[in-house]
Structure formats: structure tokens, C-alpha cells
Amino acid sequence: VDPRIERLYRLAAGRAGAAVLLGGGLPSAALFPRARLQAAFLRALAQPAGALQYGWPEGHERLRAWIAARVAARGARVTADDVIVTNGAQQAIDLAVSTLGAAGALGDGGWRIGVDAETYPAALDLFRTRGALPVVGAAVRCRYVMPHVSNPRGLALDDAARAQLLASGAALIEDDAYAELNFSGPPGRPLAADAPDRVFHVGTFSKVLCPGLRVGWLIAPRDAREEALRRKRDLDLQASSLAQSILVEFLDADDFDARLARARAYYRRRAVRLARALRRRLPAWRFRMPDGGFSIWCETGEPGDDIALLEAAVAEGVTADPGRLFRADDASAPVALRLCFSSAPVAALDDGVARVARAWDTWRRARDRERVVERSML
Ligand SMILES: Cc1ncc(COP(=O)(O)O)c(C=O)c1O
């Protein structure tokens, strides 16, 4: 992350309470089941050893069985033996990309990985760190995709795009982090159901339960599993036994489908409120109503510096995510912002957008002044 952006995020976080947080993509803390997690924690500790002891690198067997059953119910041929429990989806993406790289699946010379025009920033950073160049629209041997709910746009692939993706023959990293939060209901077939020999399927509890546990998973193609598991062991031996045991206890006692249904309704209501505020206060901005997830991707259509816009926003007491973070080439223009409806109180969304609109006016006036100065110097 550009240090200027990081500084502005931290500045705004320090003022939490006074600022409306429309950036960051955090789940709503109001949905964290604190009491149930607390009870699950106590039950996990009461188990003879599991929660406090080392475990196997692939993860807790009952948790793997739970994950496998959910993915299998969507049409994939998956058993508990296929699942590797990871430290969040982030580590699962890392294991997938490094396993693909080691297998020569990212190209012979420089590694390349195909991504959407806007995509999850920490995956872009991760690919670069691992030596893989994220590219848009080029012929590649591997693609990173979010077919059920994308970040930042919150959109699902339509049938034609999905068929085209599968027909490309490329290896696919399928990031299903937000898939369960499609507002229309449970997600359909994962890509892993249709191309199990070349799809690395990634999931997480971060968006649907809480990110603090840091539990996600990777389902690798069968012939890549050993290598992915070896890499997992090299990195950190295993995901936290304690976090996994808490989850097992929690899931045993929870109606998770009912929880997901509530979360979908909760986030959908917020999405509608944010969209309404945007239409009213920033009618020139373009956006598509998301199918799910946490955010709306807003396009201003204007050139300029999106970090300066974030600066103006933070000065107004609101945060947003500058568009460059989501682009493989880091481009600021045309200026876009990701606005999240997920974590701010619903009543604050309208005020948050009013602040963004004021920041937009300030930023445009400053930009236009700069243009006049530039022209007068010519
Ligand atoms: C699309 C996407 N994938 C993966 C992650 C990482 O999730 P986790 O907390 O499970 O590492 C995020 C987090 O923001 C995300 O937005």
C-alpha cells in the first residue's frame, strides 16, 4: 500500500467515532456473535488437549469435514481430505500462487497472473511479492477470479462469462471470500465443481463470521495438494489449533445457514441505503448496484489524483478506498473510489456520503485551480 494511503487510514482510524468509515472493507462488528464465541471458547478449552496442542498441518478434521460438506453441497466432489485449513483466505491465495509457480503454471520466464480490471488489493500486492505480474486482458496460464461476489464491485459472473472462463483452459484461483454474501441467496456451483483438476478454491470465515479468528481454507487440485501442504507446513506448521477448535465448537451449536440469511439481509439493506445516498448527493458518479459483498465501486469519470481525494475525505471525517489500490497498473485515473456500506452504522451512511460529496467539491476546486496555474505557465 502506498505509504500516503496508509498514513491517511491510520489518521482516520485514530479518530474512530468522529469519522464515518466507508473504507477498509470490514465486516460489521454488530454481527460478531460474541456470546456464542465466548461459550465456544470455553467448551474448546475444556477439551482434553486439542485446542492448546499442536495439530496436523492440514487442520482440524471436523472443521475440514464441515467445510468439505458445504462445498460439496454446491456440486463439487470434495471430501475432508481435500481441504487445507489456512490462516485466512489470504494465506490460501498465497499457497495457491506459490504452488502454481513451482509447477511452472504461471509461465516459463516472468510469471504472469490474469486479474480483473479491478480486484482485491492484497492479492495484487501478494502476487507482486511472489514475483508474479498481475495483468488485465492478456492471454495467461492462470487467473485469479471472484466468480460469485467480486471485490470491489460486488458482482457475480454471468453464465456466459463463467463458461468463457472455464473454456480458457487456464488454471484458476477461485476466491470465494464473499460468495455466501450474495444478497440473492446461497452461491451456486463453484468453478472447482467444473474444473477440479485446475481450480484452487479459496474460502474464509472472515466475512461471514469474524476475521479475528484468521481461519480460511484452500481446496487444491488433487495433484497439487501435497505441494500446497508442504508449503503450508514450511510457512507456519498449521493454522491455530485454538481458533479451529473454537470454530468447531461454535459451528456445532449454530444454525449457520440462518446466520448467513440474516447477514445477507443486513448487508443488502445497507447497500440500498448507500446507493440511495450516492444517487442523491453525487448524481454524476456512476456505479452498479452490487449483487453482494461489502462495497460499491464508484466511478467519477474524471482525471486526477485519488490520494488527494482521500486526503480531502479524511479532512471531512470520512474514509474511502482510492481506486488505484484495486488496479493492476496502480492508475489513479479515471478517479474511482470503493465505498463500503458494511461496517458503518446504517444511520451514518447518508452523512458519510454527504462528507464524501463535500470532499469531492473541495478536491475538484483544488484540481481546477492547479490546471489554471499549469496553463498560465505554458
Ligand atoms: C476478496 C478477498 N479475498 C480474501 C480476503 C482475505 O480474507 P482473510 O481475512 O480470510 O485472509 C479478503 C479480505 O478483505 C478479500 O476481500
Image: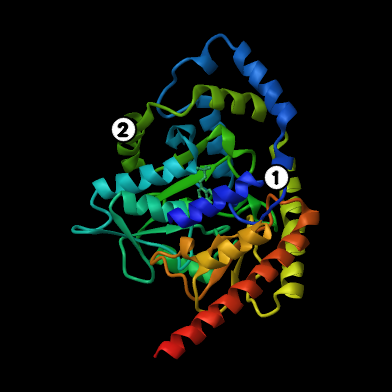
Q: Residues within 10 Å of mark 1 (few under 14, many from 20)?
A: some
Pinpoint residue 285: horizontal percent, then vertical percent. Answer: 64, 76
Q: Using residue 250 as the reference point, say whether residue 299 is left or right of it.
A: left
Q: Using residue 345 as the reference point, say whether residue 72 is left or right of it.
A: left
Helix, strand, or loop for circle 2? Answer: helix
What residue lies at 53% left-to-right and 63% top-to-bottom?
322
- Residue 272 is tagged as none
- For label 2, being within 8 Å of ligand 1 is answered no
Report if residue 187 is visible in the image: yes
Pinpoint residue 324: horizontal percent, then vertical percent. Answer: 47, 65
In the rendered image, the vertical position of residue 316 relative to residue 219, given as above or below: below
Q: What residue did someone put label 2 on?
A: 230
What residue lies at 41% left-to-right and 23% top-to-bottom?
56
Helix, strand, or loop for circle 1? Answer: helix
* Amino acid type indicated by mark 2: Arg
Pinpoint residue 244: horizontal percent, then vertical percent. Answer: 54, 27
Point out the image quarter for the C terminus: bottom left
Viewer-proximal residue among 229 and 302: 302
Viewer-proximal residue among 63 and 295: 295
What residue lies at 42% left-to-right and 29% top-to-bottom?
58
- Residue 260 is tagged as 1
* Amino acid type indicated by mark 1: Leu
Q: Using residue 170 as the reference point, say whether residue 50 is left or right of it.
A: right
Q: Residues within 10 Å of mark 2 (few under 14, many from 20)?
A: some
* N-terminal label among 2 and 1: 2
In the rendered image, the vertical position of residue 237 relative to residue 130, given as above or below: above
In the rendered image, the vertical position of residue 304 relative to residue 209, given as above or below: below
